[in-house]
Amino acid sequence: MNHLCRIPVISLFLHAAFLPAILPAADKPNVIVIMADDLGYGDVSCYGATAFETPHIDRLAAEGQRFTSGYCSASTCTPTRYSFLTGTYAFRGERTGIAPPSSPAIIKPGTVTLPSLLKKAGYKTAVIGKWHLGLGGEEGPDWNGALKPGPLEIGFDHCFLLPTTNDRVPQVYVEDHRVLNLDPADPLWVGKKQPTPEHPTGITHRHTLKMDWSHGHNATIHNGISRIGFYTGGHAARFRDEDLADKWVEQSVQWIEAHKKEPFFLFFASHDIHVPRMPHERFQGNTPLGFRADAIVELDWCVGELMKTLDRLDLSENTLIVFCSDNGPVLDDGYQDGAVEKIGDHRAAGPFSGGKYSIHEGGTRTPFITRWSGRIEPGVSDEVVCTIDLAASLASFTGVDLPEGACLDSFDVMGALLGEKGAKGRAHLIEQDNGRGGNYGFRVGKWKLQRHDSKKARNVVVEKQLENTPAPRYQLFDLSTDPAEKDNVIAQHPDIAERLQKHLAKLIDTGRSR
Ligand code: NG6
Ligand code: CA
């Protein structure tokens, strides 16, 4: 009986799998989202950097649309990645702030996500690179067993991951449900407390470090770098920081080659240029700015390798590339890597204030480029688009229905992403800092409202370590004349401020904006 019951389900499934084939191939381009980590608006040459060059990212921009108002939805990693995949603002979800090393999976199985939508459209889907959205059930990751739920339970067919972020333990790859190359005789243990009094840390063995820490990051040492959190074991599985970028490229090229004949979606989640910035030896010293900019050059190389692969496989005209970042820039994020001392005239956030952790434009307005050879006309767009919009945009473009209760803040801005004449971006965007209960930026046209629920602003420009400074609950800025948000005009425009305050409160309180 059981067996017979399955037949209609299977036939439905097959039916669904074949449906998208009705769409012409041009409507099902491959999609590669390249998400940089902590890359600021001014950190690449096509957005104004002059102290070093990023020829491959520049080529992407020259052949596609370069957005001047392209955003991620939060100024830290986990909430941006959460909302990019779910199409829902992270402040609506639980535990969506920066994830600790042993975080359980933050996006629950069954959630409609960008990859699950594309899978419905007949795509093969993969994430390669940094995850930082937790793995495992309530008890957290079972590092020596099956690491699930994780990406494979929310719509990815394949994953090859750095499980958290590389300043957090452990330094191992996760392939699908397992830690790669883990020797059962040397189990991996990850915890919050020092496992034994003798366990070497960044405090007790500071003199042995190849890169010193500046704040936090003083627990377990691996590869001469101390991290957030403790671990032991899993030695055969551990990687060298210097090899991460090469690994992401190697794995991506293999996966693209294996899926070149079907529509595919690849989320290329670079770890560059997050701390610890430890680019491969061949990139070290490439720029006068130290490892931070050397890591940008490494990121640029990755972009070049992906483009080269598409050209070689004759896929460039059938592949939409989206290049973006997960939050704005920071110089000292916990290690003494020379980023502060060597910055010179380089403006990591371009003309904007703030950066990572802040709701100023520098926190979320980042490089944002779309390229699809032969389909997107090269140009510059001032339309407002955000990583959170890719879910609704790509679902609509590939002919998949977006369920009413899913992707609650994702708008179909596909026309704008493709640079179509007259196509509009978002009418409004909420920019948040980290997880739930933080601060909000609210952009509507030229106006930017800041709402500081914490009554503190992390608005110190990235040259210095971020500091909390007292801030009034509301401030209003005219971005058309004051992109750096220096001149609070709330007293001059009380009516506009009130309208925006109410609008923002409504979007937060009603639980959805779509
Ligand atoms: C902060 C860390 C910072 C970085 C960040 C997450 C300290 C003092 N600071 O808590 O180094 O890890 O979290 O960055 O520990 S993100 O880009 O992944 O959001
Ligand atoms: Ca980040």
Image (cartoon, grey):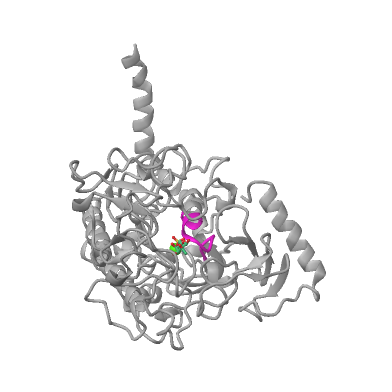
- Does residue 434 appear left or right of residue 26 in this picture? right
Residue at screen point 52% across, 47% down: 95
- Does residue 478 appear left or right of residue 331 in this picture? right
Residue at screen point 73% across, 68% down: 472
Residue at screen point 51% across, 78% down: 464
Where is residue 224, by image quadrant?
Answer: bottom left
Is residue 56 in the magenta section? no
Q: Which residues are magenta?
A: 71-81
Quadrant for ligand 2 reads bottom left
Is residue 72 in the magenta section? yes
> Which corner quadrant holds the N terminus?
top left
Image vertical order of residue 111 relative to residue 306, above or below: above
Where is residue 119, by image quadrant?
Answer: top left
Residue 332: image x %, image y %? Answer: 45, 74
Image vertical order of residue 60 relative to residue 344, above or below: above
Q: Nearer the viewer, residue 239 or 508?
A: 239
Q: Is residue 444 visible?
A: no
Residue 103: image x %, image y %? Answer: 43, 47
Q: Nearer the viewer, residue 134 or 73?
A: 134
Q: Is residue 298 visible?
A: yes
Residue 99: image x %, image y %? Answer: 46, 52
